[in-house]
Amino acid sequence: MIQIKRVYDPPAKVDGIRLLVERLWPRGMKKETAKLDGWLRDAAPSTALRKWFGHDPAKWKEFQRRYRAELDQHPEAWQPILVAASKGRVTLLFSSQDAAHNNVVALKTYLETKQKE
């Protein structure tokens, strides 16, 4: 099972394995506070794609398409998430204020599709 959560929300036992999927470390977050099991920078969008998107909901559909293309090119970046999810709950963490339009929402959808293949 894969779920998502803001990295700023308190950790919980039901989170299972906690993985940060961001290129940059979240502002104001101390590493001890985050309680991470891993930081998967390479599963996050490229810097160029992240800057192009800029969390603009009007670009959401195209962002998802471009991000999927990046993910297709780098399965080694996201496959560890599927391995972990096959053994138990995984929580993908994001720092964006927009809980509906961020890379982890797109990544979760992508991974759920890969689980069905």
Image (tube, helix red, strand yellow):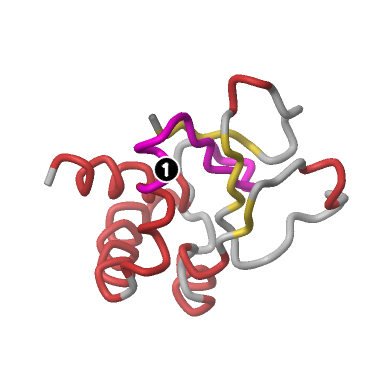
Q: Which residue is mark 1?
A: 105
Q: Residue at x 56, y 40 (%)?
A: 98
- Specify whether residue 114 is painted magenta: no
| Position above or below: 96 against 89 | below
What is the total number of numbered labels drawn onto the structure image? 1
* 109 or 91, nearer to the observer: 91
Q: Position of residue 71 (x, y in %)?
A: 32, 66
* 107 or 91, nearer to the observer: 91
Q: Position of residue 63 (x, y in %)?
A: 35, 61
* 53 or 37, nearer to the observer: 37
Q: Quadrant of residue 15?
A: top right
Q: Residue at x 28, y 75 (%)?
A: 73
- Tell me which amino acid carries mark 1: Val
Q: The residue tagged with tag 1: helix, strand or loop? A: helix
* 43 or 85, nearer to the observer: 85
Q: Residue at x 61, y 51 (%)?
A: 20
- Specify whether residue 90 is painted magenta: yes
Q: Residue at x 61, y 40 (%)?
A: 18
Residue reaching furthest to the front? 87
Write the start and end of the magenta stretch as one range: 83-99
Q: Is residue 26 left or right of residue 109?
A: right
